[in-house]
Amino acid sequence: MSLDLEPLFTPWTFKGVTFPNRWAMAPMTRSFCPEGIPGEDVADYYRRRVEGGIGLILTEGVVIDHPASSGYPRCPNLHDPRAQAGWRRVVAAVHAAGGKIMPQIWHVGLARQPGMEPDPTVPGCGPSSVALIHGQHPGVALSVAEIHQVIAAYADAACHAQACGFDGVEIHGAHGYLIDQFLWEFTNRREDEYGGSLENRLRFAVEVVEAVRRAVGPEFIVCFRFSQWKPTDFSARLAPDPATLERLLLPLSQAGVDLFHASNRRYWEAEFPGSDWNLAGWTQKITGKPAITVGSIGLDDVRWSGANATGVDELIRRFNNGEFVLAAVGRILLSDPQWANKMRRGALDEVIPYTKEALTRLM
């Protein structure tokens, strides 16, 4: 027997912001912003998901103002006044539809490769000169002075987000990009205050959060997305046990994170032996802060090329168990903007599967 979905359609008020329900749209890069400027099509894209039952939009990655921040074509930014005007239109469209919206601010770090936009002469950069996978260019190691410049760029992006009317900001600290590269021993081989021990590898992330918090003030929501896994290594682990996860999360919480976005590949998998909790559940337990869960929600597996729609009974069970306050849905919303509404009325058979053909029709 299916569990009652209505708990995930209840409002949630946090720091003065009332989210209409517990569904969020996960950030997904689309490369639909020529010159980094979101157009009316981007506003329509996010508005349709809110009309389809999603309460919170977490936007695609928005690059910060640093020459090496972007690693993909046509990624949006927040520092160009034209982009800011575009984002104001996006925010207005989402708010008019009854939703809330936060940008995910982003630097790809070593994922950037030679020849990438916007300036193909700029190399990737990171904590150390390391290739993420065999055959890739290793990029260059940031100096301490350059690290401070990047931190300031994160704070500036958060300020612009606040000025554009967003309801908060998400810092992308997951999936093998710049902040995560500092956290991960494989990519961080520094011997100064930003490398070595977990506390030193965490320093960059903490200083980014502190700078963002100073920039936006105490009331603006600051979310931090993190993951154990990396696209280049699904088995990677920043924290092999709860005690290490506590050493990772508590300094971020104390630095000013309000909301954690704990990224699993499969939300239904337990994070550590001896407990059924997933990563979001452990995050809430350790920090006392609310968490977003994510990871193949609404899909029957984790294939990137396509997957069938599936129910969310396990998600409801975990929500009722107190593991998370919001659930971020990704790929199934690309194929079917009305997914949440269809799930609410029990119309799983009407959900459009996640296929390339569906993406072409409905992006």
Image (spheres, rainbow, N blue to C red):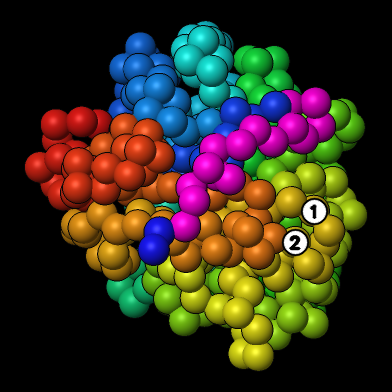
Q: Residue at x 35, y 12 (%)?
A: 40
**Is residue 224 something one can see in this rendering?**
no
Dot 2 or dot 1: first in sequence order is 2
Looking at this view, name the residue that lies furthest to the left.
357
Mark 2–mark 1 distance (CA, rounded to whole Å): 5 Å
Residue 54 within the magenta-colored segment of the rendering: no
Is the Cβ of the residue at disc 2 closer than 8 Å to that at disc 1? yes
Task: Kindly state the secondary structure of the residue where label 2 is placed.
Answer: helix
Instruction: Tell me: residue 215, above or below residue 165.
Output: below
Instruction: Tell me: residue 66, above or below residue 133.
Output: above
Image quadrant for the C terminus?
Answer: top left
Residue 187 position, x and y percent, is 56, 72
Instruction: Tell me: residue 224, above or below residue 13.
Output: below
Number of marks: 2
* Residue identifier under label 1: 289
Image quadrant for the N terminus?
Answer: bottom left
Residue 207 position, x and y percent, is 81, 51
* Residue identifier under label 2: 284
In this rendered view, identify the residue nearer to me: 161 or 119.
161
Picture quadrant where residue 141 is located: bottom right
Q: As shown in the figure, which amino acid type bears the numbered disc 1?
A: Lys
**Is residue 331 something one can see in this rendering?**
yes
Q: Residue at x 63, y 15 (%)?
A: 164
Q: Residue at x 37, y 34 (%)?
A: 341
Q: Residue at x 73, y 56 (%)?
A: 205
Range of magenta residues: 3-17
Residue 142 position, x and y percent, is 64, 57
Q: As shown in the figure, which amino acid type bears the numbered disc 2?
A: Gln
